[in-house]
Image (cartoon, grey):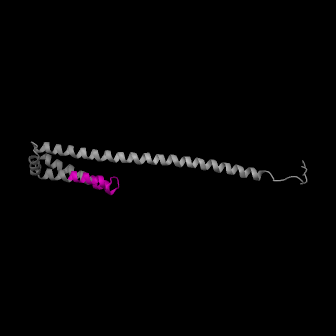
């Protein structure tokens, strides 16, 4: 077995291990892990069975199997980039909506605070002074 084939298999197995470990630790979501698992399994198959790469290269009209592998890698990277771009757009929309909702809630909170402060001021004004002091005897203060 050629050295590059062994290296490819070792790297693909390492990628499989890292992806499974990241999924186990909940660092990588399943929908993203699937892509990397398929890529790693594909690399193992192409490295273990070089005739598969030759067959696929002839089938697609690519001159050499290595060029086919590079083409395949480019397609996979383009698809991953497209998927991540759509996810980014979706997340930006969610963030914008959340920020707008927070701004509206802050305005509502400030209005409620102002209304509460005015009610408290009214109640304090009513309870601070007696309603009617006419007719009550005056109390002289005694100084000591």
Task: Work out whether residue 11 or residue 142 is closer to the camera in this orientation and state it.
Answer: 142
Give the residue drawn at x 17%, y 48%: 8
Give the residue drawn at x 17%, y 43%: 71
Count up the numbered dots: 0
Left or right for 5, reference 84: left
Magenta-colored stretch includes residue 37: yes
What are the residue bounds of the magenta stretch?
Answer: 18-40
Give the residue drawn at x 47%, y 46%: 99
Task: Work out whether residue 4 or residue 101 is closer to the camera in this orientation and state it.
Answer: 101
Give the residue drawn at x 13%, y 46%: 3
Left or right for 25, reference 116: left
Left or right for 74, reference 86: left
In percent of width and height, residue 55 lies at: 9, 50
Quadrant in which residue 65 is drawn: top left
Left or right for 89, reference 3: right
In percent of width and height, residue 138 lies at: 90, 51
In percent of width and height, residue 109 lies at: 57, 49
Quadrant in which residue 24 is drawn: bottom left
Magenta-colored stretch includes residue 64: no
In percent of width and height, residue 12 lies at: 21, 51
């Amino acid at each position: 077995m050629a050295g590059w084939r062994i290296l490819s298999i070792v790297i693909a197995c390492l990628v499989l291990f890292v992806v499974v470990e990241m999924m186990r630790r909940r660092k990588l979501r399943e929908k993203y892990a699937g892509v990397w698992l398929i890529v790693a399994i594909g690399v193992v198959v192409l490295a273990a069975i070089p005739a598969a790469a030759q067959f696929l290269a002839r089938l697609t009209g690519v001159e050499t199997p290595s060029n086919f592998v590079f083409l395949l890698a480019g397609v996979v990277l383009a698809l991953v980039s497209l998927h991540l771009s759509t996810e980014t757009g979706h997340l930006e929309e969610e963030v914008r909506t959340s920020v707008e909702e927070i701004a509206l809630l802050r305005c509502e909170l400030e209005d409620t605070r102002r209304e509460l402060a005015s009610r408290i001021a009214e109640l304090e004004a009513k309870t601070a002074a007696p309603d009617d002091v006419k007719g009550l005897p005056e109390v002289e203060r005694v100084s000591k």
